[in-house]
Amino acid sequence: MRRINRCLNVKLLEICQHTVQIEELNAKLREYLPESMREQCHVGSFNKGSLVLIASDAGWASQLRYCLPELRDRLRSEAGIYNLISIKVTIKIEEPVKAIPRKTTHTISAKTCTSILANADECSYSPLKQALQDLVEHLGKD
């Protein structure tokens, strides 16, 4: 049986390996972060010795920045990430929630309905007459 990585496209294999690397770094990071921060911070990327950490909001990012010198030293010496040069902190950017457009319902008053129907009765052009009657039927419901 062939190994799964031999079945994948080269680019897809790179993405899978990168994902595994990020997950391993996340596991190591959680070991060395204070317990209160473990769910609020995660690894964004690790490239050329620069580790990018993503904090859930500005408050957690500030607290994380105070821990960086000790965290960097412990990740180097205890976690074995010897090529770690720097750690940068960014804040998670949330996508704005798009408002779902609501279907607006329009209604017209009884007086307006009466006025439109009176004009429809006087109209000799039958398509316009029918359109006015349909308008009252559609919008006149309260």
Image (cartoon, helix red, strand yellow):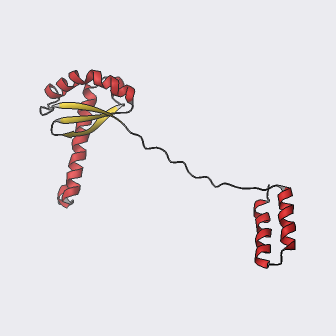
Quadrant of the snapshot with the N terminus: bottom left
Q: Nearer the viewer, residue 33 or 99?
A: 99
**Side of 107 where 49 appears, left or right:** left
In the rendering, at what x and y percent does residue 50 appear? Answer: 19, 35
**Side of 54 where 117 appears, left or right:** right
**Side of 140 where 49 appears, left or right:** left
**Side of 142 where 65 appears, left or right:** left
In the rendering, at what x and y percent does residue 100 appear? Answer: 56, 51
Q: Nearer the viewer, residue 63 or 2?
A: 63
Q: In this picture, is 115 found above or below 49?
A: below
* Quarter location, residue 90: top left
Q: Nearer the viewer, residue 62 or 16?
A: 62
Q: In this picture, is 102 found above or below 67?
A: below
Residue 3 in view (yes/no): no
Quadrant of the snapshot with the C terminus: bottom right
Residue 6 in view (yes/no): yes
In the rendering, at what x and y percent does residue 53 appear? Answer: 28, 34
Q: In this picture, is 135 found above or below 76?
A: below
Judged from this view, the residue extending furthest toward the left is 82
User: Residue sitting at 36 percent across and 24 percent down?
Assistant: 36
In the rendering, at what x and y percent does residue 137 appear? Answer: 79, 65
Total tally of numbered discs in the picture = 0
User: Residue sitting at 37 percent across and 37 percent down?
Assistant: 92
Q: Nearer the viewer, residue 69 or 77?
A: 69
User: Residue sitting at 76 percent across and 77 percent down?
Assistant: 127
* Quarter location, residue 105: bottom right
User: Residue sitting at 79 percent across and 78 percent down?
Assistant: 126
Q: In this picture, is 88 found above or below 3?
A: above
